[in-house]
Amino acid sequence: MFTESTIAALLMGTIAVISLLTPHCMAVKEDDEGFELCVSSRHRMKDLSHQNLTDVPLNLPNDTEYLDVSHNSIQRLNVASFSRLSRLCFLKATHCGLQEISPSVFNHTPALKVLNISYNKLTIIPDISLKKLKIFDLANNLYKSYRLPVSFQNLQNLDVLSLGSTAALSVNYNDFDPLMNVSLQNLVLGAGIHWQKYDSGALGKFKSLQKMSLFTSFCGSFSMFESILVDLNVTGTPALRFISIFPDDCNVTDDPFKKLRAMPFIQNLTIENTWINSSFMELFLKNLWLSSVHDLSFVNMTYNEDTPDGFQFRTINHTIKLRSITFDHVNHYQYRYPTINMSFEAISNLTYIRFSGTGLNILPCKLISALPSLETLDLSDNLLTESGFWWYTCSSVFPKLRRLSLSKNRFWSLSLISEKIHQMKMLESLDLSYNSISLDGDCFWPAQLTELSLGNNNLGNSVFKYLSSNFERIDLSKTGITAIMTEDLSHFPRLTHLQLSSNSIQVIPAHLNAPALLSLYVDQNAITSLSREVLEGLPKLQTLKAGRNPFVCSCDSHWFLTAFNKSLLPDWPLDYTCSTPPLFAGVSMSDYKTSELSCEMWLQAAIALPVIIVISAAIGLLFYKYDGVWYTKMLWVWIRMKRRDKKRSNLLKNESFSYHAFISYSHQDSSWVDSQLVPSLEGAGFSLCVHERDFVPGDWIIDNIINCVEASYKTLFVLSKHFVQSEWCNYELFFAQHRAISVQQDSLVFILLEPIPTDCLPKKFLRLRSLLRQQTYLEWPKDERKQQVFWASLKSMLHMADKSIVLKNVALAISDTAALITDQV
């Protein structure tokens, strides 16, 4: 007998939470598992719960994958509502008052994998035949029998089935026959009520059943319970879960778990939401110690001491196979510490112990810390502090402890913890999440500690300075980190797993130096894009979780969307949506399309350059073919003359001219002047001065030239080889140039009738050579199309004189009138 009974009593006494247990029903549905199984995009989810609906809407999108219509008033599921939902994978319709489901409702939903219609008023189990269905929850309805329809034999992929009805009081032998050849993983059976009958062999027909969850009461009917254990032994079920197996008022005097000794396949046993007396506990543990059970769990258990000596467990001369024990939320009925007296050998082989949610505030270190095989200790969700865990009366030895969880307690000093941890020579993993940890001083961690969790503590950006370079796994989720630097990770050469979820990190710096990193979690931060450079320093990365960040859907995300290996993203594409630009806000990034051409500048340049060259060559060829040079040249002349005429218009507004232009040409070119130039310009309303026609007879020719030049708005020089050989043409050019210098700089217009090389001009035409080099001239084209441009340019130069021109006949008339008046006077 173990003599330190007071220490054992302390073990149970310090985990006491003095409270009364209020029984509650256990939820058997696994929404999260089904959610991840089905949903690929949050855009394809429709949550219509609590909407006061009387029917499933007909206008649901065709690509809907997840539909929740729970907590409405839908008594019947109609075929029309599901006729277009071929991609529907998850349907949840709980608390709707459903009374009927037609077998044809799901004919158009072949992709359905999760169907939850629990907590309704179905009076019969619906006839369902869905080949891909994996999770089917029918618990808490009103059917009177567990007899399954024949169509259930088609549910070959079914993994989880939940059946429960407060109206079903018995289980008959043939109820589960349609599932005889289905390899069911988990069967949840019962609605918490007491059964009146169970036919032996009903559960023994399952071909393969990995886990059995039984939610029913057997008080006073332990023979029925033993029959169920016998059947489960036939199926070889390794995991059993009993929910509310004994009600609060049950007085257990028999030994219902005696059959456990003869069940070689049982590995895992869970007792949940049950009232257990100390007398029953002794019988139960005796059978357990003699069974093949490796893992034992008590969840939401109320312990009642119904014997005056409390719990007494004597030494058993038997090899104990139990290796793991869990107490998750243990409540005590009496307002005092329980009395426990048990053999130390009974627990000496334990490798895993969990005391969670028990109110533990002082560690019974002389008992737990002395366990020679203990490798994992979970003390999460308690009231422990530094002084309660390392209290002064004992030293924490823990000879083989490798993993320690102190999550959800009241620890605060990181420096003190790092010092005390040195006492645990084998410790490799420490969980300090959900505490009140502060960075109160330098930390000196033991070399063998490789894993540390500090999640959900307000630590800030400097937390990396307080960590060990030996760490391989670090969890800093929700620790108030706003930025990480490249040098932050350079201090951890052995780091393989880093969790930075739920912080405020905006940018992951380029070229991180973490050559051993295998897993990086940066989900739920403020990251807008992931660049190629971020991963260059992470050559061994296998997992990147970066969902639920405000990603910008633009060219910044092009590489991530097109080239990044999505198999590294466990949360792709579900948790990746666009936040900006507004046009794509909320759109799944998997649906956002971008092209390499629109985002890669080098590719744009590589394509644009040849295109520009080809277009330029084509334009140049057309330009050359259709005399573009000549047209451009004429356009430039026209523009220059327009600008110069506009500038000179104010200076010449008080000037009066008799002619639009004086024409200077060689006699040998008179045929072109008479047949082309004069008719074209005078036909357009221009007044021209031609020496053969308009010189005053009897006047000296030099005076005629000077008078005509000064009386004309422009002087047109028709240049040709004959022009440069004419003496009079040289005089006309001299006087016109002198006028241009003194009065009107742009009064000279040169028309090149035929090509004349400027270097071949005679020396007496030095002024003309200089003018032709400085001024633009008009060339007479042979092509009729070009001649139209020529005349338009020439006429445009002469139009500016319209307001100042005084026609010759008007001037003469005025002068004659003035002479008559003078004579009269």
Image (spheres, rainbow, N blue to C red):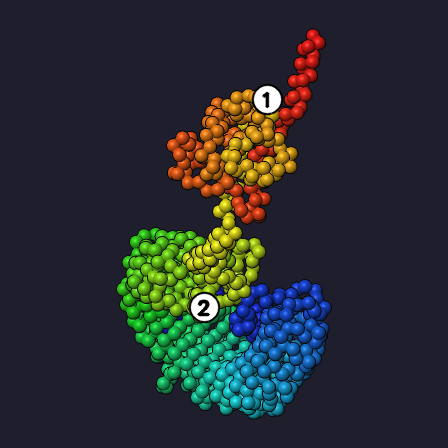
Q: Does any portion of residue 82 appear in the rendered image?
A: yes
Q: Residues within 10 Å of mark 2 (few under 14, many from 20)?
A: some
Who is closer to the viewer here, 565 or 696?
A: 696
Quarter that holds the N terminus: bottom left
Q: Residues within 10 Å of mark 1 (few under 14, many from 20)?
A: few
Residue depicted at 55% across the width and 46% down the height: 786
Relative image position of residue 354 (x, y in whole percent): 42, 71
Quarter of the image holding residue 475? bottom left
- The vertical placement of 780 against 398, above or below, is above
Residue depicted at 55% across the width and 82% down the height: 157
First in sequence: mark 1 vs mark 2: 2
Element under disc 2: helix
Residue depicted at 46% across the width and 32% down the height: 726
- Residue type at tag 2: Lys
Who is closer to the viewer here, 348 or 129?
A: 129
- Residue type at tag 1: Asn
Cα gap from disc 1 to disc 2, whole angstroms: 83 Å
Element under disc 1: loop
- Closer mark to the observer between disc 1 and disc 2: 1
Say which residue label 1 marks.
654
> How many numbered marks appear?
2
- The vertical placement of 579 against 653, above or below, is below
Who is closer to the viewer here, 63 or 599?
A: 599
Relative image position of residue 697 (x, y in whole percent): 58, 23
- The label on residue 566 is 2
Residue occupying the far top of the picture: 825
Q: Does any portion of residue 395 appear in the rendered image?
A: no
Relative image position of residue 123 (x, y in whole percent): 69, 80
